Image: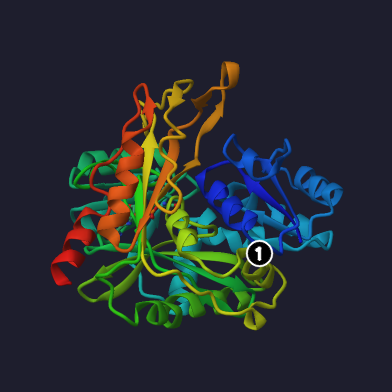
């Protein structure tokens, strides 16, 4: 199978790594890719959000499957264009990707399908925003309606800051605060059938102890020892199946991954958000544990034959990823710092490094080129071992201004160790 991956971050590096291991994949291409992906796939320049450009590249390469990593190309209709040309594509059409592209659309789908989520109001004017904030009370949750790379959400007890964020964004969704641990569940969908992958937990805040601003995600781990056993099944029944059923009824069948961002509240599981792509960095740890070859699963989702694909199998043990961020992330990340120690971080069977925001520097060096620069992945028989491997690898990387959270999976590892 000839496979083309669209995107250039840590998620696409993780996808490329899993695809490169898959014996069914005879040739692997990525566009635009990054320095790390270049070791696994042939890279091609592309404007990822341009449907004609991506379609022309896929046709030229004779791609049997195109996997779209980030949300922007999906919302721009790249998947629609590929399917129109008869090219199998993993990723929803623009109409279905609205589940991520518009928070108010997602809320509408959830209301129609009876999916549990925070009560919410869509607001356009300052008066509407003020009324909604007063109705819910603190902590206030104010969400930019459109795509904001995970950074459009403000959770605060400061009413003036909440009003200001609403004004800055224009159209917002203001909602009830959900209290409880969060998790991400990815379901592969082929328009009709859906299967869940392993749940993972992301750390969205920039600083240790869940302080600081929201980011795209500072680290993740799987499995989640604290989850009720039947949780994935329950999420499929109450969230994923109703959502894809509703989208099918609306004439926009969902093909790709439906990312359910969930909160385990005192009154049960509730949806925080939907995304139309894999979570980054959660998919890095999920793919680390996937024993089933990836291409067949994604091809099944792309071609409506998921029900016939073998169910995913998982490697026992745990994986933890720690994001190494650039100075100034998330507000104003600094680029161009030389990264050293990448080889020291690679230990077969224990740790490896995925590139999230890197570029080639002078004389063969690798330099930072984004806010989230690297994802260091550690594995082990349990979370304690996986954390140790990830942090040992993170400590061996040297980059001016680089920093990372020190508490990824700390609590889950300690609780699991205390229980065993
Ligand atoms: P979103 O982009 O909707 O996932 O929001 C980003 C982050 O903001 C989430 O992962 C949560 O940590 C937080 N958040 C979003 N909505 C809520 C909510 N209703 N209650 C509490 N926290 C929220
Ligand atoms: N890690 C959160 C996201 O991908 O949206």
Which residue is depicted at the point 50% across and 80% down? Answer: 241
Residue 285 located left or right of residue 27: left
Circle 1 crowding by C-alpha within 10 Å: few under 14, some 14–19, many from 20: many
Image quadrant where one finds the N terminus: bottom right
Q: Position of residue 318 (x, y in %)?
A: 35, 62
Q: Position of residue 341 (x, y in %)?
A: 42, 30
Task: Give the mark count.
Answer: 1
Q: Position of residue 44 (x, y in %)?
A: 73, 38
Report the colour scheme. Answer: rainbow
Q: Residue lying at the far left in this picture: please name it.
A: 418
* Quadrant position of residue 337: top left
Depth order, front residue of 420/84:
420
The residue at which mark 1 appears reads as 295
Depth order, front residue of 123/252:
252
Q: Residue lying at the far top in this picture: please name it.
A: 362
Depth order, front residue of 344/265:
344
Image quadrant where one finds the C terminus: bottom left
View quadrant of ligand 1: bottom left
Which residue is depicted at the point 46% across and 51% down? Answer: 280
Camera sees residue 214: no
Camera sees residue 405: yes
Q: Position of residue 53 (x, y in %)?
A: 78, 42
- Residue 221 vs 206, above or below: the answer is below
- Residue 284 vs 195, above or below: the answer is above
Which residue is depicted at the point 32% across and 55% down? Answer: 386
Which residue is depicted at the point 51% across and 28% down? Answer: 369
Beta carbon of the mark 1 residue lies under 8 A of ligand 2: no
Residue 205 located left or right of residue 377: left
What secondary structure is found at the residue carrying circle 1? helix
């Amino acid at each position: 199978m000839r496979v083309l991956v669209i995107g250039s971050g840590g998620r696409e590096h993780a996808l490329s790594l899993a695809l490169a291991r898959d014996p069914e994949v005879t040739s692997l291409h990525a566009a635009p890719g990054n320095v790390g992906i270049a070791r696994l796939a042939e890279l091609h320049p592309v404007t990822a959000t341009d449907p004609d450009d991506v379609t022309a590249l896929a046709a030229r390469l004779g791609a049997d499957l195109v996997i779209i990593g980030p949300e922007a190309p999906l919302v721009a209709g790249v998947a629609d264009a590929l399917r129109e040309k008869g090219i199998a594509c993993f990723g929803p059409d623009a109409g279905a990707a609205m589940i991520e592209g518009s928070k108010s659309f997602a809320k509408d789908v959830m209301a129609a399908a009876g999916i549990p989520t925070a009560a919410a109001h869509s607001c356009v004017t300052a008066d509407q925003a003020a009324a909604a904030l007063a109705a819910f009370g603190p902590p206030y949750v104010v969400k930019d309606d459109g795509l904001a790379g995970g950074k459009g959400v403000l959770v605060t007890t400061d009413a003036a800051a909440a009003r200001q964020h609403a004004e800055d964004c224009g159209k917002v969704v203001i909602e009830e605060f959900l209290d409880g641990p969060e998790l991400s569940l990815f379901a592969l969908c082929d328009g009709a059938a859906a299967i869940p992958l392993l749940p993972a937990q992301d750390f969205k805040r920039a600083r240790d102890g869940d302080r600081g601003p929201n980011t795209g995600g500072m680290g993740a781990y799987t499995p989640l020892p604290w989850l009720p056993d039947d949780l994935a099944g329950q999420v499929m029944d109450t969230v994923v199946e109703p959502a894809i059923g509703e989208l099918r009824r609306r004439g926009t069948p969902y093909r790709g991954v439906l990312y359910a961002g969930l909160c385990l509240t005192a009154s049960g599981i509730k949806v925080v958000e939907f995304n139309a792509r894999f979570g980054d960095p959660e998919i890095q740890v999920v793919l680390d544990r996937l024993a089933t070859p990836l291409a067949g699963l994604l091809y099944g989702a792309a071609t409506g034959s998921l029900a016939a694909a073998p169910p995913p199998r998982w490697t026992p043990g745990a994986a933890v990823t720690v994001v190494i961020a650039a100075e100034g992330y998330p507000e104003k990340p600094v680029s161009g710092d030389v990264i050293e120690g990448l080889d020291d971080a690679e230990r077969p069977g224990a740790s490896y490094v995925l590139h999230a925001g890197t570029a080639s520097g002078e004389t063969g060096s690798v330099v930072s080129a984004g806010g989230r620069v690297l994802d260091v992945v550690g594995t082990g028989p349990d979370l304690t071992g996986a954390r140790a491997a990830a942090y040992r690898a993170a400590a061996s990387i040297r980059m001016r201004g680089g920093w990372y959270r020190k508490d990824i999976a700390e609590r889950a590892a300690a609780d699991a160790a205390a229980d065993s």
